[in-house]
Image (spheres, rainbow, N blue to C red):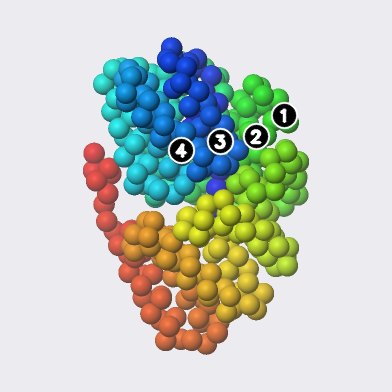
Amino acid sequence: MWSRIIGILLLGGLLCLGKPARGEDLSSLLDRGREAFKSGNYWEAERFHRLAVETAEAGGDTAQRAEAIGDLGGVLTAKGRYDEAESMCLKALGLLREVGIHRYLPVVLNNLGALSSLTGRYPQAESYLKESFQVVQKLRPGDLYGARVLNNLGVLHYKNGNKDQAEKDFKQAIAIMENHLGSDHVDLAPLLVNLGGVYVAKRKWATAASLFDRTMTLLQGLGPDHPHIASTLDAVGEMNLARKNFAEAQKAFERSYAIRLKVFGPGHPTVASTATCLAETLAANGQEKRAELLFNDALQIYEKTFGSRSAAVAMTLEKLTDLFQKTKREGEASVMSARARSIRFELENIVRADALR
């Protein structure tokens, strides 16, 4: 039942590889942008990072420009603006390749790997993430930033169906982070949720619940509307949905959905992701009318974000098919099913360019 792992980790806020010499203004803007990002205020983070890019373009060297541009790409990824984000990250990568400076390279490679994973380009994601981890290990083995990259590799392995490897990745990432920060640091939260998601998939309910409880304890100081809280609530909802505890699942998804709408606005893909889970729970609980509205909202977001022939669109069409069959609307179910099958066939039979290299 566990269909998503939300905890993609972006940006360079935890990078321990040292800071380059740069003007105080640029340093301050990047620091303020990263703090805003960490607190879940992505609009403020974008404002500071755009100012950092302007400052770096006006007077920074190539490495400084790459860092400012790459961080902006990470913020835009979190905001669901994937095309803009990829353009920024690729620009930053090109600058770093040009000057041969590696200090910031793991960050931009990690962000590109996260982007590729989020948009379903898994071979490309793996290439970026493995290179990122290799550079971290070469520059400073055991560096804290390696935990972020390992987390994203775990997400990728999970999406590819390799739950055992995902579990190893998350455990290794947690060990690195605990070694640097201790066992009660808030930055552990998304990693613990992801590991708990693996245990949900393995039906190890008690272990998963223990990890989610630990995460909620760590997050108490962030305020009630932080995105990490929404991710944890999604995980709790998924576990309860898998166990057919529909009332508890609905309670968790309703709260997560409200947080995501408040933080991201109605058009963000993570809003759609939570909406589909809430809709599935509502449908199972006999609330078909509202479930249909939420599925349709999610479908529109996915079509706008990923295009009309994406895996997310196919998944939502399949859920609508199930709903229409349940409510004896066979004609509409047949239309939705045909659209989903067409997309699935196309996705399974098209050879991507990156697979030909």
- State the image quarter where residue 261 is shown: bottom right
State the CA–CA distance, disc 2 to disc 1.
8 Å
State the SS at label 1: loop
Disc 2 marks a residue whose amino acid type is Leu
Please report the residue visible at 23 percent of the width from the left and 43 percent of the height from the top. 356
Left or right: residue 119 compared with residue 146: left
**Which mark is on residue 188?**
2
Q: Return the residue at label 4.
A: 47
First reached walking from the N terminus: tag 4 or tag 2: 4
Q: Return the residue at label 3.
A: 36
State the CA–CA distance, disc 3 to disc 2.
18 Å
The residue lying toward the viewer, choosing from 345 and 124, is 124
Q: Return the residue at label 1.
A: 183
Residue 83 screen position, x and y as percent: 34, 47
Disc 3 marks a residue whose amino acid type is Ala
Disc 1 marks a residue whose amino acid type is Ser
Residue 228 screen position, x and y as percent: 62, 44
Q: Quadrant of the C terminus?
A: top left
Q: Is residue 11 above or below residue 327?
A: above
